[in-house]
Image (cartoon, rainbow, N blue to C red):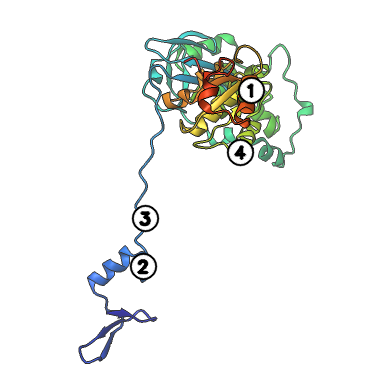
Amino acid sequence: VDLDPLGAVVTRGTHGRVASHRGQRSPSHHRTMTELGGLPGAPPPPARPEKKHAPTMNVGDTVLLEMNGDKWAFIKLKRDGTAVIGKHKDVSLDPLIGAPFGSTYEVDMDGVLYPAEPDPPEWNVPEETIEAIDDERNNADVNDMRNNSAQGLDQHDIARLKREGKSGKEIVEMLSTNSATFAKKTAFAQEKYKKKKLRKHLVKCRARRPTARATCEAYFHKQPAATNYMRYDALGMLLALGNVGANAQPLVVETCGGLVVGAIADRMGGAGAVCAGHTGGTCNSLDIVRLMNLSDAERESIVTAPVTELMKARRRWEAGELPEEVAKDDDVAKDEPMVE
C-alpha cells in the first residue's frame, strides 16, 4: 500500500496491477498516519510533558516576604512561628507551610493571613498606558485640602467598615466614591490615589522563594551596602560572562556578603566546586548564602581558601613539585569547608 501525491491509496496486486482508491483509507492506515504526525516517515509526536508543580514551603525553609512591594523580610519558617506584617504584630505563619512559593496573602483586622484575591485588571495597567490616554481633565483645579474636607468618610467610618469585615479593596472603592475631587482628577492621578490608599488600608504580602535574583533584589532595596549595591541584572551578567555552569570550578573573591558565591553554587546545582577566596586571615562574610535554601550538595560544593596560599601552591605546581610533596607542606592552604 502506497500513498500517491494526491492523497489516494494505491494497492499493488500480485501481477503488478495498480488500483487507486482515492478518498478510501483503511482504519489502520489512518491510525498509522496519525501516530506519525500526519506525514509519511515522520517521527511520532512527542509525549505531553509532565505538569511541573511549584516548590512548596516547608518547616526549616527561608521565605522572603515581600509586603506591598516596598518592604522585605527573610523569615525562617517553623511551626507556630510569627512575624510582623504591616501594623500587625505576631501574625501566624502556619498558613504558609505546605503552600507553594509565590503565594500571595492578605492580613485581616485580626492579624490572620488568608489567600489574596487577584487585583482588578484596571489596577494593573502600566503607567505608560495611563499617561497615553487622552484626558481632558486637569489637576490644576483640584484641591484635596489638608483638612480632608473633600473626603466624605472620616476615621470613625473607616474603622467601622473594618470592623464589619470590609476588605481593603472595598474600602478604597468607598473612599474613591465619597471623594469630592476624585472624579475631577486625571486617569493617572486616580490610579495613583487608589494605589496610595490601597497600601495604607491593605497589607498584601507575597511569599517568594529566596532565589539569587529575589535575594539580590531585596537587598538592593533594603540594605544595598551589604551587597555593594549589586543589582540582579549585573549579577546575571556576571554569571553569564563567567561561563558558570555544572562541573565548573570558579574562584570567587567578593565582598557582597556571599551573594555571588551563593548564586554560583545555585547555578552549578552541586556539580563542581566554587572556592571563595579571601585576602585576609579570615574569610569574608557568607551570611547571604544561608538565606538561599541551597541543597546539601550545593552547600558542600562551597569551600574557602586564602588567595595568597593558593598562589603559593600554584607556583610550586609550576615548579614541578609533586602533589604529595605539596600536600605535606604546612604552608600550603587546605580547603576549609563552609560553615553550615
Q: Is residue 126 left or right of residue 44?
A: right
How far apart in space, not on screen, are marks 2 and 1 (Cα)?
A: 66 Å
Three-letter code for the amino acid on which mark 3 is drawn: Pro
Q: Quadrant of residue 191?
A: top right
Which numbered circle lies on residue 38? 2
Above or below 254: residue 127: below
Marks 4 and 1, the one that precedes in the sequence: 4
Could you tell me if residue 65 is visible in this image? no
- Give left or right: position of 156 versus 27: right
**Which residue was labeled with disc 3?**
46
* SS of the residue under disc 3: loop
Q: Amino acid at mark 1?
A: Lys
Using the numbered discs, state the Cα–Cα distance from disc 1 to disc 3 in whole angstroms: 54 Å
Q: In the figure, is residue 334 to the left or right of 139?
A: left
Labels 2 and 4: the sequence-earlier one: 2
- Mark 4 sits on what residue? 240
Q: Can see residue 330?
A: yes
Which residue does the numbered mark 1 point to in the structure image? 312
